[in-house]
Image: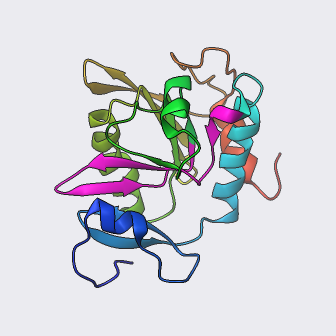
Amino acid sequence: MTIATQKLTLEEYLVYDNGTDTQYELIDGELVAMPPESDRNNLIALYLLTEFLKFVSIRLIRHKDTEIVVTGNRTRVRLPDLMILTEELLTALGGKRATITQDMPSPALVVEVVSPGKINEDRDYRYKRSEYAARGILEYWIIDPQKEQVTVLTLVDGFYEEALFQEDEIIISITFALIKLTAKQILTAGDNNPS
């Protein structure tokens, strides 16, 4: 839901506080309230977090708490479901507000878990794909419980090359080659009655 206000600059967004705990993304100067995730989507993101912890220091993992500035028609700020930072990015953040600005290095990986509906699909498959590529993020995973698939996008010469994984296919990650998960393992992490 877009909040009807004047267009905000990045600086105004970074100090915005309406006294609630509502999270917002900044899309072309407009505040867009982010509704709470479904329990299933949260569990999928948490499952991936626990799997990455086997290979990546907890200092480099962010779950729905770090925003990243990207470029659209105007400045945009996204709140990914999961991110893996680089050591250089961690140093650049320096313990300050968890906002990755344009002058900072890019994260190594961003993961989005798609919520139902065309608007959410378009946001994760189209808009964020181009925004994250332009931001230089090496790998972008789109976890889609509705389509029962995991899309791994790897940045090559400024554009994402796409690999699609379903069922018992093992996810292939150039950046995180030690991860040995199947699409089914990831997608069923959020099921109430896993098989």
Q: Is residue 61 above or below residue 29?
A: above
Quarter containing the C terminus: top right
Q: Residue at x 31, y 47 (%)?
A: 70
Q: Does residue 121 appear to the left or right of 130 in the view shown?
A: right
Magenta region, residue range? 59-82
Q: Is residue 68 magenta?
A: yes
Give coordinates of residue 10: x percent, y percent. Answer: 30, 60
Q: Residue at x 19, y 57 (%)?
A: 74
Q: Residue at x 51, y 40 (%)?
A: 93
Give coordinates of residue 185: x percent, y percent. Answer: 72, 36
Judging depth in this view, the residue of 61 and 126 nearest the camera is 61
Is residue 83 in view from this perspective?
yes
- Image quadrant assignment for residue 155: top left
Judging depth in this view, the residue of 6 and 53 nearest the camera is 6
Q: Is residue 138 above or below residue 33?
A: above
Q: Does residue 1 appear to the left or right of 73 in the view shown?
A: right
Quarter containing the N terminus: bottom left
Give coordinates of residue 34: x percent, y percent. Answer: 48, 69
Please identify the residue farthest to the left as the structure is shown.
Answer: 73
Q: Does residue 79 appear to the left or right of 189 in the view shown?
A: left
Give coordinates of residue 163: x percent, y percent. Answer: 44, 26
